[in-house]
């Protein structure tokens, strides 16, 4: 059976659609609830009772309307990009006390019209995601309007074929997901091995520990503690998400005006050969500034300027990723009420320091290992991407009838 033989139905005719109004605040007099948030849906295909939901409150009407029931399908209704909108998750069983949070929509299937799991797979398909991408509106952030969600069109065969298709996809995607998890585990093992090697090379008892602040030519600084006015183009303005795998990534970054950069540069001006350390949100990631490109950084990034007469930038790059330095950062960050690293915290970090010639030799050896690690991870990433694309293609092909799943084979 092909897609053009299946009837096209608007979502509002086969499911009740509701946009949640439950925010993250706790209000006296309301009902204590656990809140299913945007990230819970974005990172999981299924919403289950053992997930670490946030504590919040909601009114009785909100609990009745947005309490999670068996068969509910949740979708994200806004995103920073139009093509990343409408991510779906399925609720397999009633979750008492768990309420759908703001930024999410609840789709409640009319079960005489659509199988709940088939609705989930349909919403997760490229067929539905592309429709949502087209109707999403916004400039710096994109959102779905209530009417647009209800008017989405899905291909709906008879119920027995829906159930067969859902069971087929449950089974086949589970096989693909198992392979994806193995690749993730292998990537994690490669990283653990790299950290072990870094630790072995940069931490030796015969070297005296020295506080990081004594190895820098300038005091540790960070970017502005305010939100600047962003521009469509101008000077790149980087934050934590721009520090990836030891390097700076400018793709998708924000921009500020040259005038704002001059103002912020009085306090913090990154230069080639510096190090940037994440000190909020994701703590302890390090990147070397390996470019002459002019850019600015936000307050979650600390700027370190190594003194070349005392410490090699490359050696410090690796030493800060060793187990001892990372453990010091974890301890310092958890002792703060805001769970971040202060500049004094960073300055007090202790690094075991060999002579400069030995630092250079160790850095060369580690750079070779780092390059080999990068090659292995790149291969894993490429194969992971191919498997993910095949998974998405399979889902879309089944819910659009391009792959026929007869009811009797379910």
Image (cartoon, helix red, strand yellow):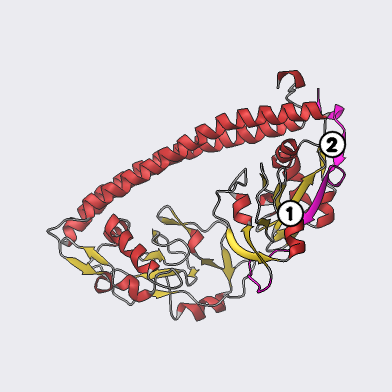
Residue 365 left/right relative to 282: left
Pointer 1 with pointer 2, Cβ within 8 A: no
**SS of the residue under disc 2:** loop
Name the residue nearer the viewer: 407 or 80: 407
Q: Please give the residue where the numbered disc 1 appears in the rendered image.
A: 105
Q: Is residue 273 visible?
A: no
Q: Please give the residue where the numbered disc 2 appears in the rendered image.
A: 112
Question: Split into 4 quadrants, where in the image is the C terminus?
Answer: top right
Name the residue nearer the viewer: 82 or 42: 42
Q: Residues within 10 Å of mark 1 (few under 14, many from 20)?
A: many
In this rendering, the answer to whether 293 lies above or below 182 is below
Identify the mark nearer the N-term, 1 or 2. Answer: 1
Quarter of the image where one finds residue 57: bottom right
- The residue sitting at 65% across, 58% down in the picture is 80
Question: Split into 4 quadrants, where in the image is the N terminus?
Answer: top right
Q: Is residue 382 visible?
A: yes
Q: CA distance from mark 1 to mark 2?
A: 21 Å
Asked if residue 15 lies in the magenta stretch, the reply is: yes
Residue 281 left/right relative to 360: right
- The residue sitting at 74% across, 63% down in the picture is 60
- The residue sitting at 55% across, 56% down in the picture is 251
**SS of the residue under disc 1:** strand
Asked if residue 279 lies in the magenta stretch, the reply is: no
Quarter of the image where one finds residue 9: top right
Read off the magenta span.
1-29
Quarter of the image where one finds residue 154: top right
Q: Position of residue 347 (x, y in %)?
A: 31, 73
Q: Position of residue 23 (x, y in %)?
A: 67, 66
Q: Position of residue 91 (x, y in %)?
A: 67, 45
Q: Position of residue 244 (x, y in %)?
A: 45, 54
Q: Residue furthest top?
A: 408
């Amino acid at each position: 059976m092909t897609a053009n033989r299946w009837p096209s139905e608007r979502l509002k005719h086969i499911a009740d659609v509701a946009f949640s109004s439950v925010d993250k605040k706790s209000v006296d007099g309301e009902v204590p609830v656990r809140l299913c948030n945007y990230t819970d849906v974005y990172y999981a295909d299924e919403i289950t009772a053992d997930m670490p939901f946030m504590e919040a409150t909601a009114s009785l009407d909100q609990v009745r309307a947005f309490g999670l029931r068996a068969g509910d399908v949740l979708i994200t209704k806004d995103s920073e990009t139009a093509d990343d909108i409408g991510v779906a998750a399925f609720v397999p069983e009633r979750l008492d006390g768990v309420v759908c949070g703001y930024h999410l929509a609840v789709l409640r299937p009319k079960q005489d019209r659509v199988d709940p799991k088939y609705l989930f797979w349909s919403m997760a398909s490229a067929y539905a995601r592309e429709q949502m991408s087209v109707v999403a509106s916004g400039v710096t952030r994109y959102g779905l309007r209530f009417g647009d969600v209800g008017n989405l069109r899905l291909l709906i065969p008879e119920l027995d074929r829906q159930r067969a298709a859902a069971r087929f996809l449950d089974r086949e995607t589970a096989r693909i997901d198992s392979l994806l998890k193995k690749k993730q585990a292998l990537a994690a093992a490669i990283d653990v091995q790299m950290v072990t090697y870094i630790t072995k090379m940069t931490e030796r008892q015969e070297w005296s520990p020295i506080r990081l602040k004594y190895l820098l030519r300038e005091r540790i600084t960070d970017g502005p503690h305010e939100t600047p006015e962003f521009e469509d183009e101008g000077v790149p303005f980087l934050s934590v998400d721009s520090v990836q795998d030891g390097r700076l990534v400018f793709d998708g970054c924000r921009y500020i005006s040259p005038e704002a950069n001059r103002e912020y540069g009085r306090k913090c001006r990154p230069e080639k050969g510096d190090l940037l350390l994440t000190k909020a949100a994701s703590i302890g990631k390090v990147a070397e500034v390996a470019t002459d490109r002019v850019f600015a950084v936000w307050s979650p990034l600390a700027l370190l300027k190594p003194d070349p007469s005392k410490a090699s930038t490359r050696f410090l790059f690796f030493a800060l990723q060793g187990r001892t330095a990372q453990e010091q950062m974890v301890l310092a960050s958890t002792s703060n009420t805001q769970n971040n690293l202060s500049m004094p915290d960073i300055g007090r970090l202790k690094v075991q320091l060999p002579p400069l010639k030995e630092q250079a030799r160790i850095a060369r050896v580690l750079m070779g290992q780092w390059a080999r690690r990068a090659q292995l991870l790149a291969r894993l990433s490429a194969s992971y991407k191919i498997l993910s694309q095949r998974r998405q293609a399979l889902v879309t092909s089944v819910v659009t009838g391009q792959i026929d799943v007869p009811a009797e084979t379910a």
